[in-house]
Amino acid sequence: SVLTQPPSVSGAPGQSVTISCTGSSSNLGANYDVHWYQQFPGTGPKLLIYGNNNRPSGVPDRFSGSKSDTSASLAITGLQAEDEADYYCQSYDSSLSASVFGGGTRLTVL
Amino acid sequence: QVQLQESGPGLVKPSQTLSLTCTVSGDSIGNYGHFWSWIRQHPGKGLEWIGYIYYSGSTYYNPSLKSRLDMSVETSKNQFSLKLRSVTAADTATYYCARGPPLAGAAAYDHWGQGTLVTVSS
């Protein structure tokens, strides 16, 4: 994938985890926004963070996003069992002229 | 609230055309505020942007699929459609329709359908 994510992360209930998303000078480094999605098995993705660090209505403030140069991160605090899902970052790549996604990160709540 | 629902055959033969329709409720495709998109997910894999269309019919396609792709919109039915020609097994995936990106603001996909699995096999 054009955007690189770790395949998996894990944490115990109540702990915090961070999911990274690494891009390049033609996407995150070109100042394109990053967005994050949460996906449960068998369902469509849900927008979790847009425009680097904004939460849609209804998304708990336990979820936060940040971006710096060619990297972005999704932080989840106070982990809950219901957070166990796949998480994807997304941006735009000017050299590909395409919207691009990360490969996804599976979050396991221990 | 905004809802999207994909429909179409779940099985397509190799070399034929994959055709899907997305029906939108809770918003009007003719509302100039958003593009309307198709995104797919190969089994057990990540997400791949296919393309998006505006209510006027303007389209933006993934260059890797552009030569085989057609998208259209029917505002009277509040639907938009996807046709992918000359399919192979590599086109087997779950296909999602989504609202976005918006004409202004963050270029995210804010509402998604449940997805429909399309298998390419003889």
Image (tube, rainbow, N blue to C red):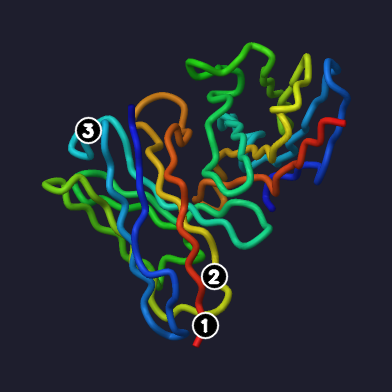
Left or right? Give the position of A102 relative to A56: right
Instruction: From the top left corner, tell me how far across and down residue A31 is, in percent.
Output: 59, 29
Kindly report the distance in space between the C-alpha atoms of the residues bearing marks 2 and 3: 32 Å
Q: Are dots 2 and 3 in contact, CB under 8 Å?
A: no
Name the residue rendered at 54%, 25% in the picture: A50
Closer to the camera, B8 or B40? B8
**Disc 2 chain ID:** B
Q: Earlier in the sequence, mark 3 or mark 1?
A: 3
Give the foreground label among 2 and 3: 2
Tell me if mark 1 has few (under 14), some (14-19) or many (20+) residues whose alpha carbon lies within 10 angstroms of its own: few
Q: Are marks 3 and 1 on the same chain?
A: yes
Quadrant in which the C terminus of chain A appears: top right
- Mark 2 residue element: loop
Residue occupied by mark 2: B92
Say if mark 2 contacts mark 1, CB within 8 Å: yes
Seen from the viewer's position, the closer of residues B71 and A27 is B71
For the point 69% across and 53% down, the residue is A1
Instruction: Quickly name the residue at label 1.
Output: B121
Quadrant of residue B48 within the rendered picture: bottom right
Query: What is the number of the mark on residue A4?
Result: none
Q: Position of residue A54 (x, y in %)?
A: 55, 17
**Residue denoted by label 3:** B32
Relative to A18, say whether A77 is above or below.
above
Same subunit, labels 2 and 3: the answer reads yes
Spatial distance from mark 2 to mark 1, Cα to Cα? 9 Å
Q: Residue furthest bottom?
A: B122
| Residue drawn where x is 33% and y is 27% of the image | B1
Give the mark, 2 or 3, whose residue is nearer the N terminus.
3
